[in-house]
């Protein structure tokens, strides 16, 4: 499975959430990506890498997430990634055909597959779709 951008979970203190998580005190101001299979986290700018369980997530308001909060968000990404991988396997013939029509067709096809899973998957699925598109193009 590809590296997936890690959406910042909603902060219980200030209620904000972001599409990506910043690598804190990063010299290059990078964002964090998670690899669902190995449960590793990396920075897309400074190429630091570490295990999910060693990750601390901080909100810009100063709130520090407990590791169980972050675990929940990562579990959602892993679940979304697995479901999408299964769907792609099941539609192997179509994947080749739609891919040949270009990136936009491929992305909207994946999005409609993801929507077909039911409305339970939120921001995490959007990032997983983005990661899969990057993997194929
Ligand atoms: Zn906050
Ligand atoms: Zn970094």
Image (spheres, helix red, strand yellow):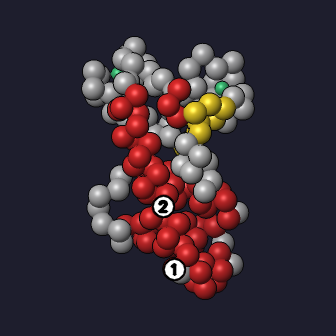
Q: Is mark 1 within 8 Å of ligand 2?
A: no
The answer to whether 60 is drawn above or below residue 75 in the figure is above
Q: Position of residue 26 (x, y in %)?
A: 64, 20
Q: Nearer the viewer, residue 77 or 67?
A: 67
The residue lying at 27 percent from left, 26 percent from top is 12
Q: Position of residue 1 (x, y in %)?
A: 60, 57
Residue tagged 1: 90
Circle 2 Cα neighbour tier, 10 Å, few/some/many (<14 / 14–19 / ≥20): some
Of callouts 2 and 1, which one flags the residue occurring earlier in the amino acid sequence? 2
Where disc 1 sits, the SS reads: helix
Where disc 2 sits, the SS reads: helix
Q: Position of residue 62 (x, y in %)?
A: 40, 14
Q: Quick check: can you spot residue 85?
A: yes
Q: Which mark is residue 82?
A: 2
The quadrant where ligand 1 appears is top left
Q: CA distance from mark 2 to mark 1?
A: 12 Å
The residue lying at 54 percent from left, 49 percent from top is 36
């Amino acid at each position: 499975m590809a590296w997936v951008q890690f959406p910042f979970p909603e902060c219980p203190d200030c209620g904000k959430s972001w599409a990506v998580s910043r690598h804190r005190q990063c010299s290059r101001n990078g964002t964090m990506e998670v690899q669902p299979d190995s449960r590793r986290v990396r920075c897309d700018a400074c190429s630091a890498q570490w295990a999910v369980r060693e990750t601390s997530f901080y909100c810009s308001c100063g709130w520090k997430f407990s590791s169980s909060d972050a675990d929940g968000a990562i579990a959602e990404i892993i679940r979304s990634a697995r479901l999408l991988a299964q769907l792609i396997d099941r539609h192997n013939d179509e994947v080749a055909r739609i891919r040949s029509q270009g990136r936009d067709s491929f992305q909207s096809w994946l999005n409609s597959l993801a929507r077909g899973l039911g409305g339970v998957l939120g921001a995490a699925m959007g990032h997983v779709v983005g990661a899969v598109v990057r993997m194929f193009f």
